[in-house]
Each structure stands twice: as C-alpha cells, then as structure tokens.
Image (cartoon, grey):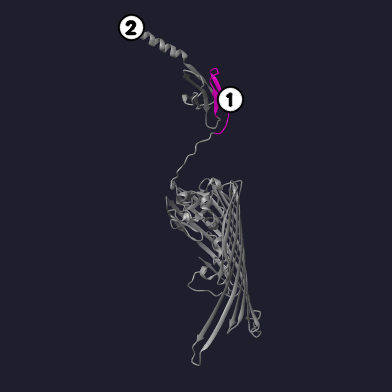
C-alpha cells in the first residue's frame, strides 16, 4: 500500500513538471540594436495579477516558468523606454522584445527640503520655509533668515558685514544697485538663497587674496526661468490738505535666461518718498573729481516730523538693467532715470524786542524744487581663473532747478540752476601666470563739470552769481604679486593726477569794485607712488604690512606757492 501511494505522488510530480511552460527571450534597444540590462519583465494573468517577475541579465536575456499561459500577457519596461505589452497565448519562445525610446511617467512625490543646508563655505536657505503670507518681496523673507540683515533701501549685511556681491542665478546683473532686486523680486519666484562665505569675486585671485565678506546668490524656481515675469501694485486716494489726488504704484519685469538677464522697474508716488535713493549703488566709491555745490536754496521744512506726514512730492524712477553672456565674458548695461518734485510753503512771524520799540518781521515762503538724474553704465567683464578684465564706462547727468519766493517784510525771489555733468571710465586687467604670479593694470579717468547759477530778485533789481567748477582725475597703475604657501608679496606703482579750475563771477555788482567780483583759480597735483606689500593668511586669519611711499608736486596758479612733498 505504501509503495502504491509513493508511486502516485511521484507520478503527480512528473506530470506537473511536464506541463510547466518556459517563458524566455532577450530585450533589445530597437534604435541601437543592443541588448538592454536591467529591464523589468512581468507576466500578468487574465485577472491582472502578477504571476512571475524577472530582470534582463547582462546579455539582455530573461527566463521564467509558468504552469499555463492561457490569458497571460507579458509587460517589459525600462526607464527612458516605452513600455511593451505582448499577449502570450500565440507566441513562440524565445522572444525578442524590441524597446523604443520614450518617457516614463512617475507618480507624484512630495520632497521636503531642509530649512538651512551647509556645504563647505556655502549656506543655502529654503525660501518657502521662511516666507509668510504678508511678504511682498524677497527682501521681506531675507530679513527672517539667520545672520542676514536687510535695510529699508534693500542693502544687505551678513553677520554684520556688507556683502561684496549679489548674484541672480550666478550672474551679477545689478552690481551695487541690488536694492532694486531685494525690493522688487517676488519671493514666490525664488526657490533658495545661497550665502557664499569668504567669497572672492575675482576668480583670478582665488588662493592669493583673502576675502572675509560674503556674497548672496538667488536660485530661481523653474517657473521663473526662461520667460518674462511681471508683477506690480498701485494705490490711490484723495487728500483734503493739501487738496488733490495721491498715488503710489510700481511695475516690475524680470527675465532670466541662459544667456540673457533683464530687470526693469517703474515706480511713482507723491506720498513723501524720494525714489531716487532706491537706485543708489551700494558698492560705489567716492568720485575722484570730488566736487560739491557752492550754491544752494533751501525750501521750508518741518522739524521733528517724518517726511511722509508733511511732504506731498511727486517722484518717479525708471531703471532697466540687462546682461548678455558673450562667449566667456559678459556685457551689461544699467540705465536709470529718476525725478523728484517738492513743493513747500511756510509762514513766519518774528518779533524782535528792542529798547526803542519792538520790530515785527513777517515772511511767507513758497518754493518748488525739481531734481532730475540720468545715469548709465556700460560694462564688459571677463572673469576666469587665469585672467580678469573689466571695463566700465559710466556717466551721470543731474540737473536741479530750485525756486523760492518770499513775501512779507523783505520780499525777494530766489532761483538756482544746479546741473552736474560727470563721465568716467575704469579699466582693470589681472593676468595670472604659473598659478602664483599676478600682473595687474588699472586705469581710472574721470571728468566732472559743475556749473551753478543763483539769481536773486529784490527791490525791482536782480543780482546773479555764476560758479563754474571743472575737474579731471586720473590714476594709472601697474602691480606685480607673487604668492606661495599663503604668503603674498606685491609691489604696486603708478601715477595720479588731479586738475581743477574754479571760475566765479558776480556780473551785476556795482562798477566801483572792479576786479573784486571775478575769480579764476587753478589747483593741480601730480603724484608718483609705489606700495610694497606683504600679506599672509591662514584659514580665516589675515596679516598684512604696507609700506607706501609717494612724491607729489602741487601747483596753485599763483594763489599759493607751488610745492613738492614726499610721503
């Protein structure tokens, strides 16, 4: 009996083995006619459930066994290829499955980024983790990021120090005028803010010149790239004192593309905010011409109260900034125009208590100040590890017209015309040889003209004053530096020159004082200088020693004795 049962079991196993079907084949890339490794091969039954699963081997082959193929289908899939489905009812094996290139749709996933990530000297802040519903610009979000401080005009400090660069997708579009970006770019367009500590903007100086300042880089979201984005807002109302309409509005446009960037803004208001301050260059140094106005007419002011409570001006700002990537370099244009009109009225009654009787002086003042500013920069820059070239042509035209009328005890009318014309060019070339030798050439040339006219009408007469101030500044220098193991030794030498002419004239003064109403003054100097320098830095500690020496010759056009000095 036991032998009979054993025989039946053996017979059942043999029959089962006989009815097993071997499903085998090879998976091939149809375009390249090459076998594919790692393709997923699944056999599903008529009910859609998985019966067998295999993966193609190094030669593209696969093999599996099934008890039956009735109603089954085979699905072959792989990333970057279109899925292939084959019914198995009427096929012969081995199969050759050809996959064609295609896309694979992934299910939706949610990725949660860290609020702050650090990699080397770069700290990355996720904007969405710091943004709040009331935020309007990226500057509002930056204020909440640890270590970052943002002033009302958009200026940024990191760890209490001014940043030395502001990038958008790795490009310095705005230069020192990045307040336009911090107050204009919507935080919804920015995915992350990168802070690059100890940032050296010039790649050619990496490892030679130490920097302890940080730079900011905005990483935009994909939706804000390769397209123009616009946003703006406007508000209006009515004022009873003074009587008239009030408004405040702005329009912001931005495009960030692989080889082109542009930011254009337009703002206007009459609620006491002077918009010209928003186009200020935070990195700008003082002009070498160093001229200042001698003539001025002051409008009435209200002490101890904010401008927005007492001033109804008319202000406008148009700024357009563009960047083109040309081969290995960049060309940038920055053009700004601002206008501000201020009108003021005031009335004073002053009583002087005197021994022979009191004297009362009444004065009603009514004035208008219209100021315009047009500036432009045209910049070409090449920033590489072996060479740095920058040429910046800049110009600025300001004109300010002021009128102040006074009635009362001493009636008069004052008018001032105060234009300012400036043009300059900065050129810098740094070449690096053998990794540790640097040669630098720097050329700076500036010219400025400051004509000023003041007219005062009093007692049916007029008195005028003319002041013409012109200056030219030049600085040409060359330097050589050698660096090894954190030690840099350099020598810089050059020539500086300054040539200034001042003309003043009072054409309406009486003739009995001839020669006293006209002045012509020339002041010039020429300086030859040399500056040896020793610098050593290790990690974040920097030691430097300078020993400058110069010879200067001054000429004063007979107003003073000419002299020479050694410093």
Q: In this view, does 205 lie to the left or right of 5?
A: right
Percent of width and height locating residue 193: 48, 50
Where disc 2 sits, the SS reads loop
Q: In this view, does 146 lie above or below 27?
A: below
Q: How crowded is the residue under tag 1: few (<14 C-alpha within 10 Å), some, or many (20+)? A: few
Front residue of 152/448: it is 152
Q: Name the residue under label 2.
A: 1
Front residue of 103/356: it is 103
Judge whether residue 92 is colored magenta. yes
Where disc 1 sits, the SS reads loop
* Numbered range of the magenta stretch: 83-103
Can residue 103 be seen here? The reply is: yes
> Which part of the image, by quadrant, shows the N terminus?
top left
Q: In this view, does 339 lie above or below 134?
A: below
Q: How crowded is the residue under tag 2: few (<14 C-alpha within 10 Å), some, or many (20+)? A: few
Q: Name the residue under label 1.
A: 33
Percent of width and height locating residue 30: 59, 26
Percent of width and height locating residue 142: 47, 54
Q: Earlier in the sequence, mark 2 or mark 1?
A: 2
Front residue of 132/472: it is 132
Judge whether residue 182 is colored magenta. no
Residue placed furthest toward the front: 47
Q: Residue at x 51, y 61 (%)?
A: 153
Q: How far apart, in angstroms, are the residues tagged by discs 2 and 1?
A: 60 Å
Q: In this view, does 368 lie above or below 319?
A: below
Residue placed furthest toward the left: 2
- The mark lying in front, picked from 2 and 1, is 2
Give the label on residue 389, or none. none
């Amino acid at each position: 009996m036991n032998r009979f049962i054993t025989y039946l079991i053996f017979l059942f196993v043999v029959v089962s083995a006989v009815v097993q079907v071997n499903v085998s084949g090879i998976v091939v890339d149809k375009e390249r006619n090459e076998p594919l490794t790692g393709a997923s091969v699944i056999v599903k039954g008529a009910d859609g459930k998985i019966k067998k699963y295999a993966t193609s081997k190094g030669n593209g082959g696969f093999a599996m066994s099934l008890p039956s193929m009735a109603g089954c289908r085979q699905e072959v899939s792989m990333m970057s290829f279109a899925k292939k489905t084959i019914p198995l009812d009427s096929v012969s094996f081995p199969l050759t499955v050809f996959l064609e290139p295609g896309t694979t749709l992934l299910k939706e996933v949610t990725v949660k980024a860290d609020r702050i990530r650090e990699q080397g000297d770069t700290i990355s802040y996720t904007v969405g983790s710091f943004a709040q519903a009331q935020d309007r610009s990226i500057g509002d979000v930056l204020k909440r990021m640890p270590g970052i401080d943002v002033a009302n005009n958009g200026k940024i400090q990191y760890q209490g120090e001014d940043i030395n660069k502001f990038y958008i997708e790795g490009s310095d579009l705005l230069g020192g005028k990045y307040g336009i970006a911090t107050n204009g770019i919507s935080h919804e367009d920015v995915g992350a803010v990168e802070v690059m500590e100890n940032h050296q903007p010039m790649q050619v100086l990496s490892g030679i010149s130490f920097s302890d300042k940080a730079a900011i880089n905005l990483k935009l979201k994909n939706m804000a790239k390769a397209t123009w984005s616009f946003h703006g807002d406007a508000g209006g109302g009515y004022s009873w004192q003074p009587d008239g309409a009030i408004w405040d509005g702005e329009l912001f446009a931005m495009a960030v593309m692989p080889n082109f960037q542009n930011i254009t803004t337009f703002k206007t208001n009459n609620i006491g905010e002077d918009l010209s301050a928003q186009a200020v260059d935070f990195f700008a140094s003082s002009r070498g011409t160093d001229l200042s106005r001698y003539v001025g007419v002051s409008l009435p002011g209200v002490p101890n109260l904010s401008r927005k409570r007492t001033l109804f001006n008319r202000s406008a700002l148009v700024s357009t900034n563009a960047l083109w990537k040309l081969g290995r370099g960049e060309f940038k244009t920055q053009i700004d125009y601002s206008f501000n009109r201020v009108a003021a009225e005031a009335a004073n009654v002053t009583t002087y208590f005197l021994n022979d009787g009191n004297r009362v002086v009444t004065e009603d003042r009514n004035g208008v100040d219209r100021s315009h500013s047009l500036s432009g920069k045209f910049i070409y820059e090449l920033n590489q590890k072996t060479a740095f070239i920058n040429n910046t042509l800049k110009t600025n035209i300001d004109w300010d017209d002021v009128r102040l009328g006074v009635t009362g005890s001493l009636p008069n009318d004052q008018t001032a015309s105060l234009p300012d014309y400036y043009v300059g060019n900065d050129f810098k070339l740094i070449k690096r040889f053998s990794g540790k030798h640097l040669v630098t050439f720097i050329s700076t040339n500036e010219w400025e003209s400051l004509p000023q006219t003041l007219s005062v009408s009093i007692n049916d007469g007029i008195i005028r004053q003319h002041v013409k101030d012109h200056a030219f500044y030049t600085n040409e220098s060359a330097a050589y530096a050698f660096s090894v193991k954190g030690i840099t030794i350099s020598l810089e030498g050059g020539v500086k020159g300054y040539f200034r002419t001042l003309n003043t004239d009072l054409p309406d003064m009486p003739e009995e004082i001839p020669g006293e109403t006209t002045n012509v003054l020339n002041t010039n100097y020429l300086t030859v200088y040399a500056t040896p320098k020793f610098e050593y830095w290790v990690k974040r500690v920097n030691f430097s020693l300078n020993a400058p020496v110069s010879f200067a010759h001054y000429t004063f056009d007979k107003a003073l004795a000419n002299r020479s000095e050694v410093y």
